[in-house]
Amino acid sequence: MKKLIEKIVQMKAPIVVGLDSLLDYIPQYIKDEAMAANENPFDAAAQAIVTYNKGIIDAIYDIVPAIKPQAAYYELYSWQGMKAMYETIEYAQKKGMIVITDGKRNDIGSTMEAYAAAHLGETDVCGQKVTAFGADCLTVDGYLGSDGIKPLLGLCREKDKGIFVLVKTSNPSSGELQDQKIDGKTIYETMGGMCEAWGLETPHHYGYSAVGAVVGATYPEQLREMRQKMPHTFFLVPGYGAQGGGANDVKGAFDEHGLGAVINSSRGIITAWKKSGSDGHDYAQQARKAALAMREDICSVIPQPRLPQ
Amino acid sequence: MKKLIEKIVQMKAPIVVGLDSLLDYIPQYIKDEAMAANENPFDAAAQAIVTYNKGIIDAIYDIVPAIKPQAAYYELYSWQGMKAMYETIEYAQKKGMIVITDGKRNDIGSTMEAYAAAHLGETDVCGQKVTAFGADCLTVDGYLGSDGIKPLLGLCREKDKGIFVLVKTSNPSSGELQDQKIDGKTIYETMGGMCEAWGLETPHHYGYSAVGAVVGATYPEQLREMRQKMPHTFFLVPGYGAQGGGANDVKGAFDEHGLGAVINSSRGIITAWKKSGSDGHDYAQQARKAALAMREDICSVIPQPRLPQ
C-alpha cells in the first residue's frame, strides 16, 4: 500500500485500470494477426490479449499508478490465458506499475497459503524459489473468517504486499447477505471491522494498513460511512464508469488528504476506442485519453492527493 | 449431480478424492525424473504433478466416483500448474470420473459468467467453441449474493453441470461470520436457504438439485441440522480424515437412502504412502488401499447407497 499511495500522490491519480481483457474488447486487427499466427485458439487468444494489454500499459504507465487484471477473464482462456496474465503482470511491473490481481480468492489454512504464495509470494520447487504470478496486491473474500485471511498477513508484513477484502460489493444483489443485520450491525460493517482488526497485524504507512477493502461505488452513502468507521483501511472502489458510479459517488471514499481510495475503471478505459467510432488502431491512445478524463473527473471533487505530514 | 449420484450408488462409495497435489506429497523419484527432464522449475513441477495424479487416478477410478482438484495447489505452480490441472481433469474424465474443481470462485455478472465458462462451460474464441478447463462441478462462494450464483445456473440446466456453494466450512474460524445470527437465524442457515432457492431453478434428479453445498465434517450437529433443512441440496463434505472428522461425524449428512452427500479426503488418500513407510513407489496402491478403507468406514455407518424408488 505504501508504494501505491506514493504513486497516487506522485501522479495525482487515485485510479486503477482494470485489465478485463475479453476478446470482445480487442480490436479485430490484433485478433486477426493472432489467429493467423496460432493454430490453437487459446494460444491465439493469449497472444491477442498480451499484445492488447502491453499497448494499454505503454499508453498509461506514466499517468496511472496501477492495473487490476481480473483473473476470471484470463482463466476463460485456459492455462494459456493464465500465461497471458503472468506476462501482463511482469510487463506492467517492469514499467513501474503496481499490480492488483482481482481473484477474490478464499480458502483456509494451507490452501489459502498456496493462493498467497501463488499470487503474492514465491513457490518452493524442490528448493528453488520461483515466482508464480507475482502481483503486489490480491483481492480476497472473507466469508471463511480469519483462517482465510491470516495466511496472507505474513506476506503483507515481510514482502510489503497488500490485500483487499470484499466488504461491500457493487452489484445489485450484494445486499442479500451483506446488508443483513447482526445485533444492529450489517454484515458488511462486521466485515469492515474485521479488516481494521486484521490490519493491526501489518505495518501502517501514511495511516493505512496493508489490509484494504473492496467497497462498491454504487453505494455512496455506505462509502462515506465506511470511510469514517474504517480509518486505517484503504479502499479499492469498483463500479465507476460502466457500472454507473460517477465522481460524486466515489467522493466519500477519500480522506482529507485526498487519499484512502483507489477507483477502478475497466471497460470505461479499455473499450474507449469503441465509443470513438474508430477501427481500434488507436485503442491505446483512446485508453490514455479516457484515463486522463477519469483522473480529472475524480480530482475535481476531492482534495489534491498529498502525503500526510 | 445425476451422474455423481448414479456413480455413488454403482460404486457404493459416497467419496471424492481431493487431488491437492503439492510437490511435498509426491515421491522423490517422480520429482527427480521431472527435474532432470525440465530446465524451468514450474515445467518440472507440472510434469511431476501430472505423473503423480495419473497414477492415483489409474489406481482408484474403478472404486471412487470423483476427484476434486484444489485450484490453489495448481496456481501455486503458475500457468504451468494450471496446465497440469487441465491435463488432470481431462485424464480423469476419460477414465469416467466426475471432476469437482475446488476453486471457491466468486464474482458478479459477466465476471462470474467468465468463471462459469472457464470451469464448467465453453469459451468462444473468435467463433470457435473451446473448453478451457471443463470440470463437471465447481465450488463457489455466495458472499456476493444471487448475482454471483445466477450466471452458473444456466450451465447447470443446459450442460448438466453442478455447483457447491460454501455454507458452513470446516475451519475453526468459520464461525466468525457464518455462525452470526440474523433474526435468530445463522448466516450459514441463510446461505443454506439461498441454496435451496437457487436449486429450484435447476433440474432435480433423485431428489437433489444441481446446487449443492459445502458443509464441513467438523460440525456433525450442524450437518444433521442442515440435512433436515436443505432436503434438495447435495452436500460436499470436507474435513474427513486429516482435518479430524470421522465416519460418525459425517453420518448426519446422509439421507435414508444413503445419499445426499459426498465425503472428501485429500491428504488421507494421496499421502497414504508416507504413513506406510515406503519410498513412494507404491503410492498409487497405497492411495487405493486408503480409499477402500475410507469407503468401508463410511459405509459402515450409513444406509447402503441406493436410488430412491
Image (cartoon, coloured by chain):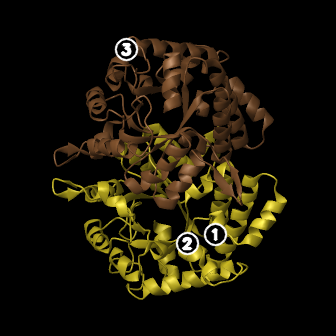
Chain colours: A yellow, B brown
Q: CA distance from mark 1 to mark 3?
A: 54 Å
> Where is residue A207 drawn, in percent x and y?
35, 69
Q: CA distance from mark 2 to mark 1?
A: 8 Å
> Where is residue B301 drawn, in percent x and y?
36, 13
The kind of secondary structure element at disc 2 is helix
Q: Amino acid at mark 2?
A: Arg
Are the two marked residues, 2 and 1, in contact with CB atoms closer than 8 angstroms? yes
- Left or right? Give the position of B219 relative to B258: left
Residue to which mark 2 is pinned: A267
Q: Amino acid at mark 1?
A: Tyr
Looking at this rendering, what residue extends furthest in the front direction?
B309
Residue to which mark 3 is pinned: B303
Q: Earlier in the sequence, mark 2 or mark 1?
A: 1
Q: Which one is in front, B11 or B202?
A: B202
Residue to which mark 1 is pinned: A25
> Which chain does the numbered disc 2 sit on?
A
Q: Which one is in front, B275 or B187?
A: B187
> Where is residue A199 drawn, in percent x and y?
35, 57
